[in-house]
Image (tube, coloured by chain):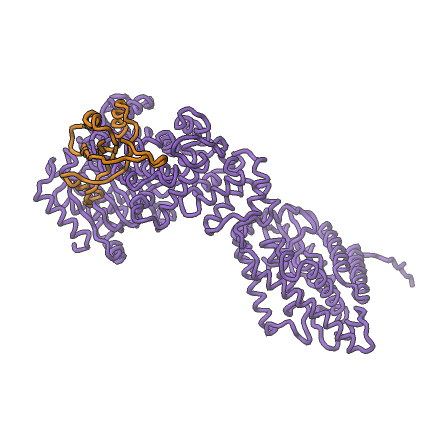
Amino acid sequence: MSSEPHLTQTDPRQDARAARAARLDAARRELADASGRGEGGRHAMRQYSHRMDALIQQLYAEAGSLTQSVAVFALGGYGRRELCLHSDVDLLILFAGVIGRDDERFLHAFLNPLWDLGLTIGHHVREVADGAGLEADNSEFLLALTDARSVVGDATLLDQFQAASDVARTNARTLEALKGLIAERHSKYNDTLYQLEPDVKEAPGGLRDLFGAQTIAKLTDPALLSNGGSGARALEDAEEFLLRVRSVLHLEAGRHHNILSHEVQERVSERLGYAGSTPSQRVERFMGDYFRHARAIDRSLRFALKAAPAPIGKNLVRGADGIRFIDNREAAERPESWLGLFQAALDGACPAADEALTCIGQNAGRFAAEAFFPTTAHREALLRFLKPRPGLYARLSEMHDCGLLGQMFPEFKAINCRVVRDFYHKYTVDEHTLLTIRNLERLTDKPSRERERFGRLLGELEAPELLVLSLLYHDVGKWTDDDHTLESARMAHQMFERLGLDDAQRAEVDFLVREHIKMSLVAFRRDTEDPEIFRQFAQFIGVEERLKMLCLMTLADVEAVSRETLTPWKEELLWRLYVDTYNHLTLTYGDEVIDRQQSLHSAVLAHRPDDLESDEIAAFLEGLPRRYLQLFSHDAVYRHVRLSRDLAPDAVKAWLNRVDSGWELTVLTHDRPFLFSNISGVLSSYGMDILRGFAFTKPSGLIVDMFHFTDDEQFLELNAEGEGELLKTLTEVVLGQKEIATRLRGREQGAFRRKLPGFAPVVHCDNESSRRYTIVEIVAEDGLGLLYRVSRAMSESGCDVDLVLIGTEGRRAIDVFHLTRDGRKLTPDQQVEITRNLQRVLEGRS
Amino acid sequence: MKLIKAIVRPNKVDEVKAALEKLQISGMTVTEVRGHGKQKGHTAIYRGQEYNVSLLPKMEVEVVVPDSMADDAIKAIIASARTGEIGDGRVFVLPVLESYKIRTGERES
């Protein structure tokens, strides 16, 4: 019989497993020993967490090769390095990209050994892109994430994960979830901490309350717990005490057990070294300490719940003293985030907190103007911020006082505390400037009866932020004693580039800054009862939008000179000049056709592209009102000229443009019955809300219509084919191949139901203002299909709609139609008839 | 002495002042006023709605001059404030019985 030699074979995997188990056992023994001595507090747990980190790092290294960046983060108690003997080990495993099969293999190779070791693992696996939906993740995960700590792998993944999220909403939801969980947990204990057999983790005044208070502080104000409640020191003592108690409980039970029952109280008090001749004496003293610490935690938690500022944005909270940064150090390095603080203060109708202003004041000088608006989004945010509303002056003043305004707008620094001695100005130039903005914002908040008319003008502006920007710059040129308007305009141009304003915005601000004293000169120094004066002024202004801006600028500017400067007398003069000029612009523009001497005419010819001849452009412009050139850019004019070339009688050229606040539809075609009505009807049939627009008709019958509308139902947004469908319908309706009335009827009925009570429509027929046209002004409650209905009624009365101006003020439509009938103005009888028909339509009687 | 009260167009105040200064009349009171003459204002239309503009903005210039200068002052005011159109204003002349300097209490003749 032969015998084979016995070979001792070792399985390397088993060896590794045994080695890991030995390491874990050693770590646990270490903590158990400390716990047995009553020393299982913060230090011992930190040590145990450290050993767990090493184990996880080893498993990560042994889990195989990686195809992408992966990181492991400790969450919850483990994240705080307060891992108890039988605590769950909560982990977040974060992948940079999409998790593939290789990554799943890695996960198994990493997690299986942890389970083999008998650990209770709570693991969350996420991709960085999941951060985008973080605020909707489960609330326990959100809470655990507040203690996230990198253990191994690419630590920056967590920053990327959180950067993808809406931090403000995530923090707000985390906080709400935490408050809910606290209330729910407390109710289980009848809302009292005085439990005879308390759960040291879950009961009121227990460890969860302590972590709750700490989390609230972390999310809102790191200094919160030092400023109120029991104070930081008392909380530290309470935490150490409860951790030691919990360690003994885990040790005694040999499992995850946190209830301090009567039997266990004796052993815990003994292990913690309480003095006393009998167990009950020791227990009494020990429980006395327990309740003292629980009270401290409870008090701090209540304070945190009551006093914590509300998170309202990334690194922003709202406290009792206003909006401030959660982390000033982080804010100090991110100047582009500072405007957000003032915007939040504006939105919340509260100030910026002193602490935040100090932080900004200390750091503003480190950054150039460009650093505050590095992206288009930041520049757009600035323009949104400048929209006049209550509180804007106060916020701008805060920005000025802490030095931010001068850094954002270096030109503004030139008038910092600038004194100009004259007989009428009462304030320094910078304060005068800010007061102009205050005067404007006051028009937005229940102005006096006399000012309501100016308030309405402000409400009608398309871009009131440009008016505020112009006010901010209107006097910066006063640093010099020369003509300050020219200097202000020159300095404003420096800002245009930084803010990336488009050509139209630049032109508007340039005009307002350069001409900001023009209207007061005309109103107060010229004979405004002389029609020639306001005719010239109207020509100088060009269009109503600019007139409204300059009127408001004048009002705000004069009022900011001193308390006495803007008398009711001056206010009246200004208003009358506005009304006369407005009437001239809207009622007589049809008589003022483009002539070759007009500077804009020359400019259009001078800058023409190679494919267009001067004569062709001039022929196109002939017979159009002058305001056509003031409303359309050169490029738009050139496009119109090209499209109008050999335009067939049944051709309809229409196109849509996306603009800041909605859409623009432009239509070029030959005039035909019900044209204007049909175009507006098509837009309304798609639910579009027409805000502004105009229609021009050339003597040759060519029409150019432009409608600015909003798509509240997002038809164009949500339908890839939407633009094509709308334009196709438009063409078919205009050419009479499709009728629009049926499609529109259902929507119109809905619109009628929304009528405002007590608002009577106004129809005014004017045969005097224009030599060529009868003008019908309509002021009525805006509603879907309004333009369709009124213009249809005009066409049905045999009128030609030659020119149209469409405007809205809130829910009020202000439309001006220039009409003829058989090429002539309407007779008195025809005026009566059209007025009656329109009244009937507007009152919903037909 | 005469008190001359002139109601003039707002844009004519500077010219009236200049004309009076040429006559060495530099002390004057200028007040923003509103009122109407025979025409009782007019009707204006804004956005299709009529509103009555009954009180028109004007400026009132007051000067006190010796009797000997009153005619020249009146002529200067009328010449400088006139446009020839309706709404040029009015000049009123009132006798002044006594005049005192408040600072010194001195009576002026």
Q: How many marks?
A: 0
Q: Is residue A66 above or below residue A373?
A: below
Coordinates of residue A510 in the picture (x, y in percent)? 38, 30
Residue A280 visible in rendering: yes
Coordinates of residue A346 in the picture (x, y in percent)? 46, 48
> Quadrant of residue A486 in the image?
top left
Q: Nearer the viewer, residue A619 or A364?
A: A364
The residue located at (7%, 44%) in the rendering is A829
Q: Quadrant of the N terminus of chain A?
A: bottom right
Q: Nearer the viewer, residue A273 or B8?
A: B8
Coordinates of residue A135 in the picture (x, y in percent)? 53, 55
Q: Nearer the viewer, residue A274 or A602?
A: A274
In the picture, one chain is orange; tell me its letter: B
> Quadrant of residue A89 in the image?
bottom right
Q: Is residue A760 left or right of residue A564?
A: left
Residue A726 visible in rendering: no
In the picture, one chain is purple; tell me its letter: A
Q: Quadrant of the C terminus of chain A?
A: bottom left
Q: Is residue B23 above or below residue A810?
A: above
> Quadrant of residue A560 in the image?
top left
Q: Is residue B24 left or right of residue A76?
A: left
Coordinates of residue A531 in the picture (x, y in percent)? 20, 32
Outermost residue toward the right in this view: A1
Q: Is residue A388 left or right of residue A181?
A: left
The residue located at (52%, 47%) in the rendering is A352
The residue located at (25%, 33%) in the rendering is B62
